[in-house]
Amino acid sequence: PASPSLCRLYGYLYGVNGLPVSAASIVASLPKGVMRTDQLVVSPFAVSTVTDAGGYFFLDLIPSDSLRPSGSTYEISVSRNDGTILRKRLTVPAQPNWRLTW
């Protein structure tokens, strides 16, 4: 990630035909509302990206254990124009990168 205090959440998206899914939308938000870290106010509004031609995506996020109140989670959603593929609340770990699995 751009900052050592962030965790790069990444993953790959494939269709039932075994081919990568490109241009799918990946969105992360804080469903409990505005948060804070030790010195920052953290907006709850979504950050997003899209999968590339290989189905790869990533988002750089503040680890959940750095957010206050403690126990805060992110809502991650994966969707295409024809519908939502995944919507899940997750704890982002305090590590440099983490592969999204479910």
Image (tube, helix red, strand yellow):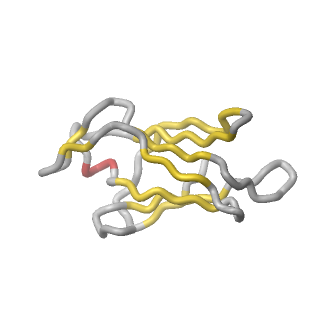
Q: Measuring from the top left, give residue 74's x and y in whole percent.
A: 41, 41
Q: Position of residue 96 (x, y in %)?
A: 39, 67
Q: Quadrant of residue 14?
A: bottom right
Looking at the picture, does residue 97 appear above or below residue 62?
A: below
Q: Is 81 left, or right, of 25 in this rendering?
A: right
Against 71, residue 2 (above or below) is: below
Quarter holding the N terminus is bottom left
Residue under the image location 57 percent in, 35 percent down: 87
Which residue extends farthest top? 32
Question: In percent of the image, x 70 and y 65: which residue is there?
Answer: 54
Left or right of residue 35: residue 84 = right
Which residue does the image show at 34% across and 59% down from the upper left? 94
Q: Nearer the viewer, residue 53 or 13?
A: 53
- Locate residue 44: give its quadrant: top left
Instruction: Report x, y in % for residue 49.
Output: 53, 52
As drawn, which residue projects farthest toward the left?
39
Residue 82 % position (x, y): 74, 34
| Residue 25 located left or right of residue 44 | right
Pick the residue in front: 29 or 89: 29
At x 67% / y 38%, what residue is drawn?
A: 85
